[in-house]
Image (cartoon, rainbow, N blue to C red):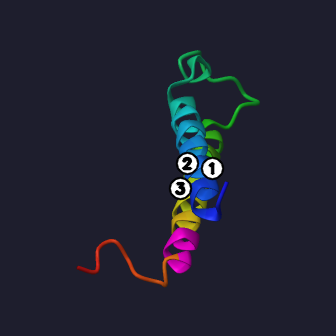
Amino acid sequence: MNIEDTCKEIRDALKVVAKEVRGLMNHEVFDSPLDSVRNEPEMKANIMLTYRHIEDATMRLGKVIQAHDGGKSVYDK
């Protein structure tokens, strides 16, 4: 498989993982009464940071594809 197809395959897998991570924001743990140990704002902040890092990784693999194609953006038309 060439690098472009490999990057596209990984990007597709990352998009699935990103959706699952984003879904953690609605996890049942956030429906239960807050206990003294759990720090919900910290939990949610780290979920969102994880999601954003996955989005960034997806974008960067797109940049690999773009550079492989000579650096031309699909939006440069």
Say which amino acid is labelled 3: Glu
| Residue range (magenta) | 63-68
Kind of element beneath mark 1? helix
Q: Earlier in the sequence, mark 1 or mark 3?
A: 1
Give the spatial CA distance, label 1 vs label 2.
Answer: 21 Å
Say which amino acid is labelled 2: Met
Q: Examine the rendering and report whether any part of residue 49 can be seen.
A: no
Residue at the spot 51% in from the left edge and 63% down from the top edge:
59
Q: How many numbered marks appear?
A: 3
Q: Are there few (<14), some (14-19), or many (20+) residues within 10 Å of tag 3?
A: some
Kind of element beneath mark 3? helix
Residue 9 x %, y %? 59, 47
Give the spatial CA distance, label 1 vs label 3.
Answer: 12 Å
Image-quadrant location for residue 18: top right
Question: Residue 21: which disc?
Answer: none
In this orientation, which residue lies closer to the viewer: 22 or 74?
74
Question: Residue 48: which disc?
Answer: 2
Q: Are there few (<14), some (14-19), or many (20+) residues within 10 Å of tag 1?
A: some
Kind of element beneath mark 2? helix
Q: Earlier in the sequence, mark 2 or mark 3?
A: 2
Magenta stretch secondary structure, dominant: helix
Image-quadrant location for residue 12: top right
Q: Look at discs 2 and 3 and give the one toward the viewer.
A: 3
| Residue for badge 3 | 55
Say which amino acid is labelled 1: Ile
Question: Residue 10: which disc?
Answer: 1
Residue at the spot 49% in from the left edge and 74% down from the top edge:
66
| 67 falls in the magenta region | yes
